[in-house]
Image (cartoon, rainbow, N blue to C red):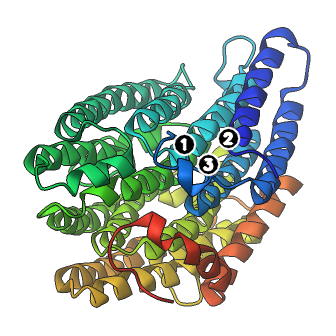
Amino acid sequence: MIPAGSLEIAVLVWAGAVLMLEAFAPALEKRTIAYCTIGFLTLVLVGTWFVQPTSPAVVTTNFYVADPLAIFFKRFVLLTTVVVLVMTIDYAPVVQAQSSGRPPLGEFFALPVFTCAGLMYLVSAIDFVMIFVALELVTVSFYVLVSFNRRSAVALEAGVKYLVLSALSTAFLVYGIAWIFGATGETNLQRITTALARPEAEHNAALFGALLVVVALGFKIAAVPFQIWVPDVYQGAPTPVTAFLSVGSKAAGFVVLLRVLQPFMMLPNIRRVFVALAALTVLYGNLAALPQGNVKRLLAYSSIAHAGYLLIAVACLDGNAVVFYLVAYLFMTLLSFAVLVIVAQQTGEGMSDFDGLAKRSPFLAFGMLVAMVSLAGVPFTAGFLGKFFVFYAAIAQRETLLVVVGVVTVACGFYYYLKVIRSMYWQVAPSTAPIAISRLSRLTMTLLIAGTVLFGVYPQPILRALKPQVPAVAAGAAITR
C-alpha cells in the first residue's frame, strides 16, 4: 500500500524536475517532457488504487484526509491534468509563435502539474489552514497560466482580472475563517461541527463567517453574483488553461464547498442561501450564453450555467448528484475544448469558424457533436443523467422553484448548443482543406467520446464508487440509488 500523501509529494517533485530541465537542458525537446509527464501522471493515477486510506481515528486531528471522496477526486484531477497536457501539446505552436525568444514550453508543461498537486491537496483538506494553503498553490499557478501569452493584450487583461478578483476572494476566505475561528476556537472542520453543537456556541458569528467563506468559494466555482471574471478570463487564457479552469478548478471548489458546508448545515437559513444562488446562477449562465457568437465565450457562460445545476444538488443536500454531474461535466467539457484547441489554430474561435467542419474533419465534428448534445442534456449521454439526478434531488426535497427554473433553462441550452452543431453540419465550409489531428489527440478524444456515451447509458460504475462516500460528502438526506 502507498502511504496517504505520497502521491502529492511525487507530483510536486516531478513538477520541480520539469522546471529544472527547462532551465538547465535547453536543447532537450520539450514535447518529450510533456509525453513523459503524461506517462508519469498516468502511473500516479494507477497508484491511487493502492493508497492506504486515512484511519478514522486521525481524521479529527490532521489537516489531511484520504477518505473515499478524496481518493475519487484525486483520480478526477489526475485524469483532467493528463487531458489538459495533451491539449497543451496541440497548443504548443501558439506558444512558440507568441514568444519573442526561446519559447518557455517547459514552464507551460510544468505549471499544470503544480496546479494538479494543489488540487489533490485541496480535495483532501479538512482544515481551513490546509484549504487556504492548497488554494493558494492552485491560484498562483493559474495566475501565470492565464496570462502565459504575454504578448497578447487580451491574455494580459485576463490575467489582471483573474489576479485582482482572486485576491479579493482570498480576502473573503481569510476573513470568514477568522470569524469561524473566533466563534468556535477551531479550524478543523470536524471539530468545528462539535463546537457548533454546544448550546453556548456563537451561531450568529459562525453563520456570518460561513457566508464569507461561501462568497470566496463562489468566486472559484463561478456562481452568480461572483462570476464577473469568467467570460473575459476564459476567452483570454490559453484554451488548455481555460479547460483546466472550467473542469479541475470547479470540481475542487465544489468538493471544498461540500466539506465546508457539513459543519454549518445545522445553522438557520444557510440552505436558503444556496437555493437563491442556484436559481440565479442557472438563469444568468443560460440567458447570457444565448447571444454569444464566440464558441470559447459560449463555453464560459455554459460553465456558469453548469455551476448552477451543481448548486441545485448542493442546495438539496445530494452529494452523489454533485459528484456524478462533475464526472459527466469532465468528459463533455474536456471533449469540447480538445476540439476547440485544434479548430481554433486552423480557423478561429468564432461560431462561423466552425462552418462546414463536418466536411473538413468528420472526426472533430462528431466529437463536438457528442460534447454539445451531452452539455445540452440529450438522452443517452452522461450530461442527461447528470441533470436527471440533479432534478430528481430537487423533486425529492420539494424545491419546486429550482425544478421549474432548471427545466426552463435546459430548453435555452438546446438553442445555443445546437447553434454549434448547425454551423458544423449545415453551413458551407469556407475551405475544404482537411485538419490534421495527432494520434495522441485522436485517442484522447475517442476515450472522452466513449466515456460521455458509456456513462449516459451505464452509470453504475460511478454510482457504485459513490456509495461509501455519502456520509463524507454532505450532512443531510441523500438519494438512495
Q: Which residue is mark 1?
A: 64
Q: Which residue is mark 3?
A: 344
Q: Earlier in the sequence, mark 2 or mark 1?
A: 2
Regarding mark 3 in the picture, which secondary structure is present there?
helix
Asked which quadrant contains residue 266, the reply is bottom left
Q: Residue at x 11, y 63 (%)?
A: 268
Please give left or right for residue 368 compared with residue 407 in the image.
right
Q: Are marks 2 and 1 in contact (CB under 8 Å)?
A: yes
x then y, percent, for residue 172: 24, 34
- Which amino acid is tagged 1? Tyr
Regarding mark 2 in the picture, which secondary structure is present there?
loop
> Foreground mark, 2 or 3?
2
| Relative depth, front residue between 434 and 235 | 235
Q: What number is the disc on residue 5? A: 2
10 Å neighbourhood of mark 3: few (<14), some, or many (≥20)? Answer: some
| Relative depth, front residue between 222 and 441 | 222
x then y, percent, for residue 358: 69, 71
